[in-house]
Amino acid sequence: MFDLSNKVALVTGGSRGIGRAIGEALARQGAHVVLGYASGEAAALAAVEAITAAGGKAEAARIDVSNGPEAERLIAEIAKRLGRLDVLVANAGIAVDNLLLRLEEDEFDRVLSVNLKGAVASARAAVKVMMRARTGRIVFISSVVGEMGNPGQTAYSASKAALLGVTKSIAREYASRRITVNAVTPGFIDTDMTANLTEAQRTAITTAVPLGRTGTANEIAAAVVYLASDEAAYVTGQTLRVNGGMYM
C-alpha cells in the first residue's frame, strides 16, 4: 500500500521540519525525492544523507519559490533531467507575525510571495509536466491558521487560506488529465519553529486541542504520503486536516 516506487517527488521547503519529514516519508515508500530549499544548503544535504543512509533516493536542489519565473525554470529542469515529476508537495513557507496596525506592506508582500505566489508558480511548472504524462499529484501545505485565523498572523493566515481556494480551482482545471490536487492543513506541530515557546504558551495551545497534545511532523508526512499515492486517485480538491481536532 502507498507504493511510490519509480515516482519522482519534489518537496519545496524540504530541508527541515515538516518538509524534511515529508521527504523522508516519500522516500521510504520508494520515491526519488528532490528536497528544494531556498537557503540552508547544509540542512538540505544532511536530510539527503539521512534518506540515502536509510536506503532511499534523494537529492537537494536550490529553489527560491519567491522568484516565480526562476522557480518554474528550475522545476522544469529537474523534471527534464529525471525524466518525470509525479508528485509536487508545495511546502515552502515563511511567517512574519505582526498585529494588523503594525504589519508593513513589504512584510505582507514577502509572505504572499513565498506562501501563495511561490506555491502557485511551483504548481504551474509541475502541471506542465504532469499534463503530458496525464497523471500527477499536487499537495499544498496550508495551515489550520488559514481556516480559523490567529491574532498577529493576518499575512500568514491570508496566504494559507488562499491556498485552499487555489487547491479547488486547480483540481477542477486538471481533473480530466488525472492530476489530483489537495491540501493538508497542519495544526500545532512540534518543529524547530515552535521549540522556543515557553511552557505557558505551549500549555495554552494544547488546551485548545481536543486530543490534548501537539502533533508531529511525521503525522503530517503520513497524510501527504496518502494523497501522493495511487490509493488517493479518487481524492481531489480536498483539505485534509491534521490538527488534533483544533478546527473541525
Image (tube, grey):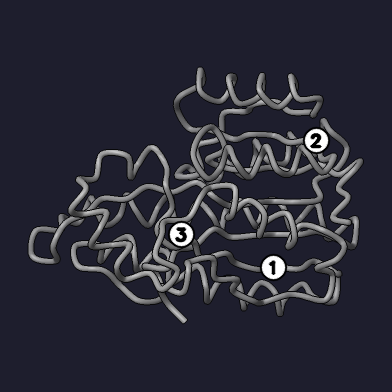
Three-letter code for the amino acid on which mark 3 is drawn: Leu
Three-letter code for the amino acid on which mark 2 is drawn: His
Residue 219 sits in quarter: bottom right
- What is the residue that sits farthest to the front in this orientation? 212
Pair 1/2: label in front? 2
Residue beneath the point at 82% across and 30% down = 81
Residue 130 sits in quarter: bottom right
> Horizontal placement of 62 versus 231: left or right?
left
Pair 3/2: label in front? 2
Counting every numbered tag in the picture gives 3
Question: Quick check: marks 1 and 2 in contact, CB under 8 Å?
Answer: no
Residue 230 sits in quarter: bottom right
Pair 1/3: label in front? 1
Q: Which residue is mark 3?
A: 116
Q: Which residue is mark 2?
A: 32
Instruction: In the rendered view, tell whether residue 125 sits above or below residue 176.
Output: above
Q: Which residue is mark 1?
A: 181
How packed mark 1 is, by other alpha carbons closer than 10 Å (few <14, some 14-19, many 20 or more), is: many
